[in-house]
Amino acid sequence: MKRILFLLLAAVVAVGASAVVPADSLYGKLRHSVGLDFRSGYIVPVHSFYSGENQAGKPVNTSLAGHLKYAFRFAPESRMGRLSPSAYQGLGVAFNSFGSSELGTPVSVYAFQGARIARLSSRLSLDYEWNFGAAFGWNEYNAQTNPFNKVIGSKINAYMNVGFLLNWQLDKDWSLQLGVEGTHFSNGNSNYPNRGLNTLGARIGVVRKLGGGEEEDAVGGDAGFDPHFSYDLIVYGAGKKRGVEYDGSPYIVSGTFGVVGLNFNPMYNVNRYFRAGASLDMKYDESANLAAHVAGVNGDDIRFFRPSFREQMSVGLSARVEFVMPIFSINFGVGYNVLHKGHDTGGWYQVLALKTHITPDFFLHTGYELSRLHDPQNLMLGIGYRFHSR
Amino acid sequence: MKKWAILGCLALLLGSCNDEVFVEPVEVSATECTLDGNGDEQFIDVSSDDWQVSNVWYSSPALTDAVVVHYDAAGNPMDGDAQSRWQLEGVGRMEVRHPLAVFSIEHCADHRLRIAVEECFFFSGQELVVTVGNGYASQEIHAVLSPAERYRVEDVAYNFDNYSRWEETGKDIDRFYTVNSTDAPMEYHLTLDKREYSEVRFIGETDRLLAMVGEGVKVAVPEPEDDGFGLRMGDDQALLSSGWEPLTPRPEEAEVVTMEIPPRSLAIIDVKADRVYFKTELTLTATNPKSGRRRQEKGWVERWTPMRFTHTVEFVGL
């Protein structure tokens, strides 16, 4: 399961990296840059481990990271360049330290994208940037060797980051970036424990353009854009761990359960950067409503009768918004399961997904579902196809 | 790129199923059945492929003494320590043998449960509760072994060539009292019937024998020759019983002793007998009228027979 998660996340990164395509009217001749970031953050104490209940007996509250990044922009005269002149995307590698040997020093590999939000002056702009990838090399929980670490349950965890930056163009080649950011590490419930690690912090970095090139002032536009409906059909799957409470005792169920889902997103493309709509969400969760079907317990080993298909299947309706950038789109959704049976498959749910376009119509889907705003559900790793795109 | 993405998703779906934590519920095609004690079998479908006979409960305390033999899937008898007495792990059979019932419980190769009874001689239906399960789920099957039809005795053959015999003399067998309250002597007739003072019982597998033919069955029994040696068949019949039973008296063949009781006196008459005992082997042949099965059961008959009576009289004045 961890291997497949890694491969799919790597695919997202690879797609971002593989967009070095021959110059054509869509992308034009790409503009390249490299960057170096130093980031420091405060680790939000979501678990007593961070407050000092660890082997060292000291709070774990500081994160440090050094990032090395490669980015590219589309040529201003290209179609993408005209539509998103300030957008940049690329690959990054980060070396993380949390001041705790119990957590380790993981290395993150990620795709990122950023763009200007507003130009504040001729040289200063307010930008945003998101990072998404995987962090490798954690020291995970182990009852014998790492018993206090009840926050990180796997060697590989997903890495998500969003930041808001002040971008100061020093000269035509160099720029300085200062900003604030938030970061989240977790494994999407593919293993236990999974409290994760969250930071709030600041970053400072420099970017060097390669190959020269003038700064584009184009604002970008919707010229020629015709608002329309498009329809995304997504199939996804994931593995998840499950814990149940039975007879007053908690049990971690052995093995990994499968989740399969189908989403149909009809979206109205308001402009090139934003679309909104609804989604019909169907999901089968092999781990749903197990607590009502316990067959028996043998020590720590708990067994179940398989719940009926209806108890593990849900159909929901959600409202979706999607922010569209070159190659990547970020989709948010809030929904409610209108057809379900049992507690686990009912209620409100929330979705955050990254769509990575391999072709204009075909994309990878990397998402996460939360239930009732606090119950982590599952990753949503899949593929999608867009009908009626323009 | 597209192809690898699709293959990755398929691998994700197939690799995440967690069959190992799920167990099948155990469901059976019937939770109750009745088996004809003359010979019957019932097959019960069990939904789970992985089940075993985890327990057999029985209503009769007598079955506690039953011999239980386990057989493996190939029909070979298994070591008594290899398996718990009332459990069957995997495919196999347990045969339960008791003098009054023979039945078997089998986990068949096709994963059905087979309950079979050869014969059940209990006088009332015997309840079995067979529990099948897979360690997490179980089901009980309530089976009733109905009593078999009682066998009809066709013939009882005795061995006259090899028997045990001994004698006993002067055995006190009875005492009589009679009163003459008149002023004249009174004649009194003492009737002594050998059959009334004979005792017969049957020994050997009598529990089974008696259960097989039922209660109240009379069979012909041999009697000693007139000289007390040798055996012959006469008209005597005795109740088939494991306890000493008298023969049916024949007053017309009884010995009559006449005596005079003095006036106004009480007569106390003590009767003694010289008796002969013999024990010989028997072979009883009986047939089940319903199934037609014929059985031969062996046993022994014992008989005390008075050959000669003596008596003493004491008179007590009133």
Image (cartoon, coloured by chain):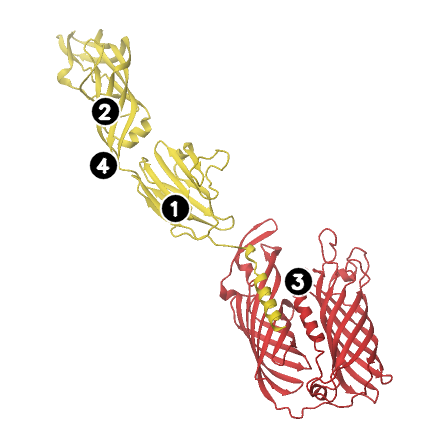
Chain colours: A red, B yellow
Other-residue count near label 2 (Cα within 10 Å), few / some / many at <14 / 14–19 / ≥20:
some
Residue at figure coordinates x 57%, y 86% from the top left: A229
Protein chain holding label 4: B
Residue position for label 4: B289
- Mark 1 — residue? B142
Marks 1 and 3, how far apart at CA: 52 Å
Above or below, B130 relative to B169: below
Direction from residue B22 to residue A173 in the image, left or right: right
Position of the C terminus of chain A, as image quadrant, is bottom right
Looking at the rendered structure, whether the residues under marks 1 and 2 are on a common chain is answered as yes
Do discs 1 and 4 belong to a common subunit? yes
Q: Which residue is mark 2?
A: B156
* A314 left or right of B299 in image: right
Tags 1 and 2 touching, CB below 8 Å: no
Q: Which mark is residue A3?
A: 3
Disc 2 to disc 3, C-alpha distance: 84 Å
Q: Secondary structure at mark 1?
A: strand
Q: CA distance from mark 4 to mark 2?
A: 17 Å
